[in-house]
Image (cartoon, rainbow, N blue to C red):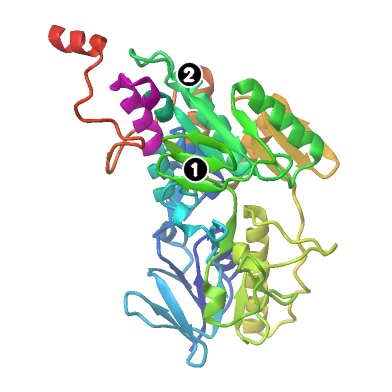
Amino acid sequence: MSHRIVILGAGFGGLECARALARAPVEVTLVDRHNHHLFQPLLYQVATAALSPGDIAWPARSVFRRQRNATVLMATATGLDTGARVLRTAEGLDIPYDTLVLAAGATHSYFGRDDWARFAPGLKTIEDATAIRRRLLLAFERAEVTTDAGARAALLTFVVIGGGPTGVELAGAMVELARAAVAGEFRNFDPRAARVVLIEAGPRLLPAFPEDLAAYAHRVLDRMGVEVLTATRVTEVDADGVTCGDMRIVASTIVWAAGVRASSVGTWIAAECDRAGRIVVAPDLSVPGHPGIFAVGDGAAVTDAKGRPVPGNAPAAKQMGRHAGRVIAARAAGRAEPGPFSYRHHGDLATIGRRAAVVELGRLRITGPVGWLFWGVAHVYYLIGFRSRIVVSFEWIWSYLTFQRGARLITGATAPVAPPVAEAAPIPATLDRARQQA
């Protein structure tokens, strides 16, 4: 019987590991609770109606349709029996393995305040992105049908908590949605009056970037109309807004971009984990004390040659997945294993809305339109499939030329956005006249 490899997670690390095993004499089973691979760096564009979910996600089965030694299973893992070498699932299916690769990724961290999650959703899945998009678009629609100035101001206040790349990109996209994409489409209020607030607990935005690039991002956001609050810690989040010490911000839409933690798979095997829940791995990415188990991606605590933590981004996850796959392939074929994992940093990128971005490539730093173009090319390059690259490129060009966004659909539940608009609120005069004329 062939050596059985089970990979838990169809993210960047899991996909790259499975691909690295394409020619190995093994049987690969890729397990994920979703049926697709998601390009998470562009999720914020789905949340702000710039792209549709299908533009940045692909069925995992289609990715491996030509890899004959790979099987894809849609199942939710619930635990491990390391003695029997079996992965347990919620569907009742036990999946045996000889080698297991944990690539389950990360989720949101609310730093002990998980009760905030229902008021301030994070952005990790398509469901998260479409829920945020629904809240944003509903806020504009509710603002059109209320005559209460206070309620309208609250509806048009959007708060992003966390000043890393996701928070910066979200805030920039939100203000562009209000100031350009929907401007002129409403009759009872001006969408350009929307208020976007970006809150960062640290002293500056983009802490992983050089200070001059972070300062540039701050200036651009200021110029766009985003209210940037640094050195400001959120102390409470509820249905009506956020509290920062003595300051209260009443808002309809709050998005959490302040922190992440690894999935709980490390606890299943009682592995040593860091404060973020990431599994501490050996130089070859195997889990110490657990023969035949590897950890890659956001769920693995890895340091580079200088002892610095490897960032939780797509390039790092892909490199880890590829290395683990090569180690496993070498073992299965009886060849010499590659040396220890060595992370190669390709740079940091973040876009700040239309025609502005920050790019750090070692000593090379790029900002402005050139940085924005570089950011776009890099992200298109990492997309899977020719169709996605063409569609996303076309959507970006169309949006750039027309200021329009083509994914402004409100789907799913349409409960009132906080603060709720009373059912008996009077109909604005202009809307009432339009109905009479109709």
- In the displayed structure image, the side of residue 219 where residue 191 appears, left or right: left
- In the displayed structure image, the side of residue 232 where residue 408 appears, left or right: left
Q: Which residues are magenta?
A: 134-151
Residue at the spot x=48%, y=73% of the render?
69
**Callout 1 environment at 10 Å: few (<14), some (14 to 19), or many (20+)?**
many
Residue at the spot x=59%, y=47% of the render?
382
Q: Amino acid at mark 1?
A: Val
Kind of element beneath mark 2: helix
Q: Amino acid at mark 2?
A: Ala
Viewer-side residue, 17 vs 290: 290
Q: Are marks 1 and 2 in contact (CB under 8 Å)?
A: no
Q: Is residue 292 visible?
A: yes
Q: Earlier in the sequence, mark 1 or mark 2?
A: 2
Q: Which mark is residue 193?
A: 2
- In the displayed structure image, the side of residue 334 where residue 402 appears, left or right: left
- Asked whether residue 141 is drawn in magenta, I would say yes
Q: Which residue is mark 1?
A: 255
Q: Which mark is residue 31?
A: none
Residue at the spot x=19%, y=8% of the render?
433
Measuring from the top left, give residue 171's x and y in whole percent: 56, 34
Q: Where's the C terminus, which quadrant?
A: top left
